[in-house]
Image: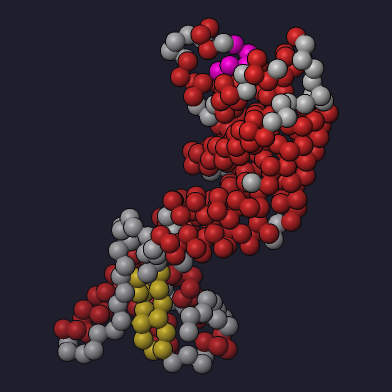
Amino acid sequence: MSIHAPRSEIWKLFDNVILLSRGATLYSGLASAATEHFEECGFELPAFVNPAEHLVDLAAVDNRSEEAEQLSDARVSQLKGAWHRKAQDQTLDGRTPPLVLDLDDNAKQPRVGFWRQLEVLTRRTTKVTIRDPMGLAGSLFEAISLSVITGWVFFQLGHDLTGIRSRQGCLYTASSLQGYIIIMFETYRLTIDIQIFDRERSERIVGVPAFLLSRRLSRLFLEDLPVPIIFSVVFYFMAGLRAEVATFLIFLALMIISQLITVTLSALCVAVSRDFAGASLLGNVAYTIQTFSCGYFVQSQQIPIYLRWMKWVVSSELVLVSIFDLPDIL
């Protein structure tokens, strides 16, 4: 059996124990001899302390600060080396060597296969999303409320010159405002989840591709599709855009793509900065640059040629302008 920090009463029932740290053996043998072994290594059992808790503390790597992590890493390396030497000594003496596991800490490949990672992470993220009803309801409520409010503002736009100008603002609102709200929420949520990912990745349990893909698979039918579908259905027809199936489907497809681009951008921001303040600042800067260069406020030909490349950076708004050309909307 495998157990973490057993009570002292349970510890007394053990005959043999194996102590592991990041896949490496620190001790394997009689439970009654465990504390003696670690005393020989310089780690004496304090008075009135549960031996099991003492051993787990010795094997744990403290990630709360860089200094603590360095100290705990050095302790684990010392204990791992001591157990290796003890195993070698017993082998040379002709005795049966104790169990020694030493998975290479420097290996870059995860110990778990990609598909297994994807399966477990997708199932876990789905459960976490469902068990956060306020967050899930907030995403759906945001799509409904924002579509109704903006649809009311741009309600049944006319076909005169004023209506044409208003339609430009209508498309800008649809493609940018919705995404801006999503990126803030996803960035906040990801700064929390990334802490678990960092710990599991340091232990080579999960990899980056499985982590990112699992988030989208688990939320595809919970958020990534329902949010843009709800927003598009309400906003498109309230604004009075062309009542054609093909045109609406193009609009809907672009809203779904915008949703996926936005959550991907939030992952990029969190990859650069793990805290919400830094990641949200990067997200705001990216959206501001996109707004300036997307073609709604200035024609791309008027932008200096060395800055025109910015319009292709997360520029779903520019795609909307290209497809929903104003004369065609009329």
| Residue found 69% across the figure and 61% down from its top | 131
**Measuring 50% from the left and 39% from the top, which residue is drawn there?**
268
Res. 146 in view: no
296 within the magenta span: yes
Magenta residues span: 293-298
Residue 149 image point, x, y percent = 81, 32
Against 247, is 193 above or below?
below
The image quadrant that residue 97 belongs to is bottom left
Considering the image in quadrants, where does the C terminus appear?
Answer: top right
Q: Indicate left or right for 94 with 330 as reference.
A: left
- Which residue corresponds to the image point at 60% horizontal and 51% vertical from the top-left? 220
Left or right of 34, for residue 190:
right
Q: In front here: 306 or 224?
A: 224
Coloring basis for residues: secondary structure
Dividing the picture into quadrants, the one containing residue 290 is: top right
Position in image of residue 124 (x %, y %): 57, 62
Front-most of residues 161 and 185: 161
Of residues 147 and 14, which is closer to you in this image? 147
The x, y position of residue 78, in whole percent, is: 33, 67
Eyeballing the image, is 11 above or below 160? below
Q: Position of residue 57 (x, y in %)?
A: 49, 70
Asked whether residue 265 appears in the rendered view, the answer is: yes
State whether the magenta stretch is mostly helix, strand or loop: loop
Please tell me whether residue 157 belongs to the stretch shown in magenta.
Answer: no
Q: How many marks do you count on the picture?
A: 0
State the residue at coordinates (46%, 76%): 55
